[in-house]
Amino acid sequence: MSTHDAHWHQRADLKPDYGHSFWWFMFANGGAIAAILLPVTILVAGVLGPLGVPNWMEDARHFGWTLSNPLVKLYFAVLIFLTFIHAAHRIRYALFDFGVRGSVLVLEWACYGLAVVASVAAIALIVITP
Amino acid sequence: MTEAEAAPAAARTYRRQLGGGWFVSRPSYFLYIVRELTVVFMVAWLAWFLYEVALLKQNAFTSLAGNYAVLAFSAVCLFFTLWHAITFLNLSGLILRVPLGDGFAPPTAIKVLSFGGLVGATALGGAVMIYLGYVKL
């Protein structure tokens, strides 16, 4: 008799943890988006701008005009949401590395919850501005 | 039957307790923790950006030209954001498994594409963001 269980993938104890995989999925996508898009955003607005290079945050008129574009709003909504989720995941595991190992559920709700609430507030601000 | 045979003792394991400063015991541990904390600077810069958006909403935004406090803050944030970008994209060839024929795309090709995306987005995005500053309104 074969010991191979043809229905091993239906065993309840082997089912994937969808919540765990969801946050790792968001972490990976957030990390990639932040790695590719955030450097140029900081470089132009935060470094070249103060050095006197004209850019989209040159003054209130250019800033408001650019931010009124729906594609720009979408760009920042995606960038901010995914970066915040990525950061929440990193901080959640960094706290574990620093010895915070009790109340895992509370820690997860605090990190991911704060990231989601902050993202919603940030996106709302971007949508209503200027 | 002896007592030992009836109930064998549980396997003795040893878990080394890590002190609070374990991450300074080796340079590689320290670099690992720095990589984990790069997100603090990324989030800090985005929070500052949202503050500027709020100022714009209140008609209180002023030009950043010549603002060296913003320059210094952004330079530090950019340094750690690039740290994140390089360490994150450097792992792309190891993590991303792209099916290609009977096997997978070579890891080096995936890594080149990832860093190409960073360079391309920086060049194209930078050009667009600077061009917008020259638009006559």
Image (cartoon, coloured by chain):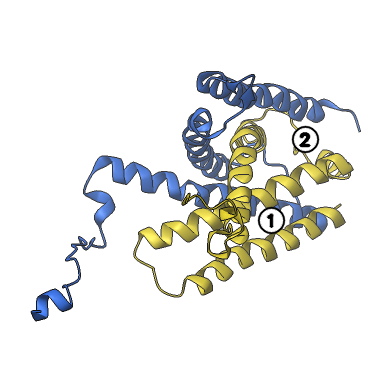
Name the residue that disc number 1 marks.
B51
How many neighbours does mark 1 have within 10 angstroms: few (below 14), some (14-19), or many (20 or more)? some
In x, y percent, where is residue A76?
75, 45
In x, y percent, where is residue A45?
67, 37
Q: Which chain is yellow?
A: A
Q: Let me know if residue B80 appears in the view.
A: yes
Q: Are marks 1 and 2 on the same chain?
A: no
Residue at x 66%, y 32% (from the top left corner): A44
Camera-side residue: A67 or A10?
A10
Q: Let me know if residue B49 appears in the view.
A: no
Query: Gap in Å between the C-alphas at discs 1 and 2?
Result: 16 Å
The hue of chain B in the figure is blue
What kind of element bears circle 1? helix
Rendered position, B41 above or below A41 = below
Amino acid on which the number 1 mark rests in the picture: Tyr
Amino acid on which the number 2 mark rests in the picture: Trp
How many neighbours does mark 2 have within 10 angstroms: few (below 14), some (14-19), or many (20 or more)? many
Q: Tell me the tag on residue A56.
A: 2
**Mark 1 belongs to which subunit?**
B
